[in-house]
Structures are given as structure tokens and as C-alpha cells.
Amino acid sequence: MRNPFPKIGKVIKYDFKHSSRRLLPLYAALLVLGLLTGLFAEPMGNRNWESTSNGNSYEFHMSSSDANFSREMMFGLLIMAFMILSVTTIVMTVTSIARRFSQSMLEDEAYLNLSLPVTMGEHLWGKFIMAFGWMFCCCIITSLSGLLCFIRMDLPSIFQQISENLPEFKDSLNYYGMSMGRLIGLAIMLSIAFAFFIITLIFVVNAISHLFKKSKGLVKFITVVVLFWINGWLFKLVPTFDTRDFDVMQQVGGAFTKSTCITALILLLVSAVYFAVTQWIFTKKLNLE
């Protein structure tokens, strides 16, 4: 029996080499901008406000030690730039995955890739794993750069306050029949299922549009609309609940867990169908002429 992992590894390595040229500089820029934003941030404890009375009116101004308008202005601009770049990074990650898939499987580069001794399934699995890896990196880099924005905000004290309030939050979760571990597990599960859904959606939309030689952009748009309409119908299967329907609030956690698990299961099943349809189209209907 053939071992597919070496071939899949080569597909991942080849895709990483090409995608990293665009994404790694973008991630590095986000980290640098997060660090600059954090360095320009003024610790909240250093802001001392004074007031002066002038008749019936009061004027508020910063004390001389904090009178640094240019620094405050620069911090505000950096915060805006960081937010814009964060959104851009997420969008560029998804669009880069879609663009890379189209280039390597449907455009001129496909002639070389598909001539290699690699099966269609190995090609698709390699691209799927690489796409998930980029989404995971995007999540980590965005979170880390956001944390850097608070580098001068006495992070140990912030974490200590969070730790002190954590028991109260756990008690609230226990009241609804939930636990911290279960909540984190459900969030991770749902995030992974949603990432699978987005990746396979990119795959199947490109595969279906390939069947039409003209107006591929319009076909992609129509395909996305139709697939989201079908998905919306499927998600009606997810049970909803009202907290007023329960005799004891501890039942809420079980209902929430059930709904979340069914949502993740639907996402995973839809992703499997999308992947299977993509593989079938590329195996049976691919025509690069």
C-alpha cells in the first residue's frame, strides 16, 4: 500500500514556499506595528488630570508631566493603523489561500503540478493542510500582536486581576451547568470546524466554476450564494432553546453544548461533501485546455 504522507509533505512544502512570500512579510508587519503601538501607549497610571476654575466654568487639562500631545496623537493613529492591518491580514490570508489554490490547480502552474507523480487526493490534502496551517498562524499572530499593544500596561497586574475574577466567572458557568474546560473545548471545536468549512468552500467554488469556460467570476458568485442558501437551510436543524423553558438553569449548559456540537457536526459534514465534490471534479472533469 502506498504511503501518501511523503507526497503530501512535498505539496505542503511547495505551497508554503510560494504563499510565505506574501503572508510572512504581512505577519511580520503586524507584529512590528503591534509592538510600536504598545511602546507609544501611555500607562494609565501616568495620566493625571487637573482642573482650574474660571468663574462658572471649569477647564480640564493634563499635568505638565503628561502634556505630550504628539505622543497621544501618534498612539491614536497607530491604534487605527493596527486595527486596519489586523482586518487586512485576516482577509489577505483567506484570499491568498484562494489565489494559491487557483494558481496551482487551474492556471498555468497546474500543468507542472499535475504532471508530478502525486495523486489528486494528495494534492488536495496537501493544500488543505497548508491552508489550515496559515489560518492557525493568522490567529496566533493576530492575537500576539494585539497583546503587544498592551506591553506597557502592566500585564502582570492585568493577568492577576483576571485570575482573581476567574472564580466568580467559574461560579457563573457552574450555575448554568457549564465549566471552563467545556467552554474552551467547544470554542476550539467550533473554530476548527468553521476553518474546515471556509477552506473546502474555497475549493469547491473554484472546482465548480472550472466547469464553465465563460463568466467564471459570475459563476463563482452564484455558487457562493446558492451554497450559503443551502447551508442556511441545513443550520435550521440546529436546535434552539430559551432559558425560560428550563426548570433549573443547570440545564442551559447541556442545551448549549448540544447546539454547538450539532453546529460543528454540520460544518464538518458539509466540509467533507465539499472536499469530495472537489476531488471528483478535479479527477473526472479537469480540463486545462
Image: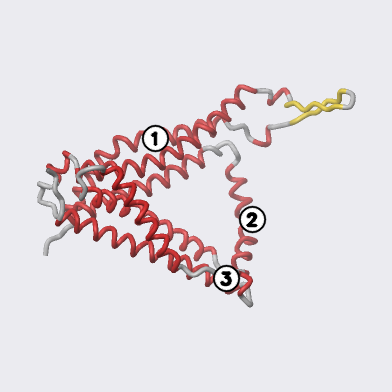
N-term-proximal mark, 3 vs 2: 2
User: Which mark identifies residue 164?
Assistant: 2
Q: Which residue is mark 3?
A: 252
**x and y percentages locating residue 242 in the rendered image:** 59, 69
Type of amino acid under label 3: Val
Q: Secondary structure at mark 2?
A: helix
- In the rendered structure, the answer to whether residue 247 lies left or right of residue 3 reads right
Query: Is 204 or 154 nearer to us in this picture?
Result: 204
Q: Gap between marks 3 and 1, in whole Å?
A: 43 Å
Badge count: 3
Q: Gap between marks 2 and 1, in whole Å?
A: 34 Å
Type of amino acid under label 2: Glu
Q: Nearer the viewer, mark 3 or mark 1?
A: 3
As displayed, is residue 102 above or below residue 67? below
The quadrant of the image that shows the N terminus is: bottom left
**Label 1 packing within 10 angstroms: few (<14), some (14-19), many (20+):** few
* Residue drawn at the location 55% of the way across and 68% of the way down: 178
Q: How did the renderer colour the structure?
A: secondary structure
- Disc 3 vs disc 1: Cβ atoms closer than 8 Å? no
**x and y percentages locating residue 210 in the rendered image:** 21, 48
